[in-house]
Amino acid sequence: MTLVFHEPGAPAIAMAQLLQLCLLAASLFALSFKATSSSSSSSSHDSHGIESLHFALYQHETINKTGYIIVNGPAGAAVGQTTTPFGTVFAFQDPMTVAANISSKVVAIAEGTSITSSFDGLRSISIAKITLRLKNLKGSISIVGGTHNIKPADHPVVGGTGDFMFVQGYVTSSPVDLKGLTVTYKIVFHLYWPPYAKKFSLHDKHM
């Protein structure tokens, strides 16, 4: 028979070491879980497959050339640089460029109509189709909403065609130059494609 001798206190030391290893493993697991949770939260949009595109263009409108009063409103403010009478129906087909200078490259056309909806002549309900010819994206988006002639205004995107099929989001219009026959607005696009509309990757696409 073989006898095995243990040093005094060896079981207690082994137990203490085992407990330390368990605590270390638990700590590492907690740190790993925290890092994983933080990473998934910051990339939640990617995990849901939502693609987005954000850019700005400049809309140039020239009275009696690209924009016309179809029906003159019966009351309210007079026709001016930034005002039209209440009920005025206005139609436009305006070029949109990559810079505020009207001679810069035209990459889109905005066509639509608006009806003056306030008696001060500054607000209107607008409907427009914007045909876009960007570097790798071609198609159109449709927008509708309230426009303010001298303040920024958001317009929801209600549909799209071509590469913008099923697109969602909004555009923001802000006045840049309201003097002279041609007025200029900055149009900022915030476009989002839901997962079911994903046909291509937008990460490498630029104007």
Image: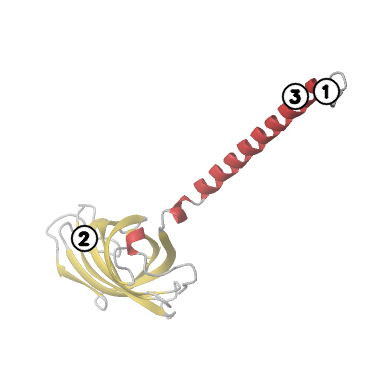
Query: How far separated are the C-alphas under marks 3 and 2?
Result: 91 Å
Residue lying furthest front:
1
CB atoms of marks 1 and 3 within 8 Å? no
Disc number for residue 10? 1
- Is residue 170 among the parts visible in the rendering? no
Disc number for residue 78? 2
The answer to which of 134 and 174 lies nearer the viewer is 134
Identify the image quadrant of residue 130. bottom left
Q: Which residue is mark 3?
A: 15
Q: Quadrant of the N terminus?
A: top right
Q: Identify the residue shown where x is 16% and y is 62%.
A: 88
Query: How far separated are the C-alphas under marks 1 and 2?
Result: 99 Å
CB atoms of marks 3 and 2 within 8 Å? no
Amino acid bearing label 2: Ala
Measured as percent of width and height from the top left, residue 196 is found at: 32, 61
Q: Identify the residue shown where x is 11% and y is 59%.
A: 74
Amino acid bearing label 3: Met
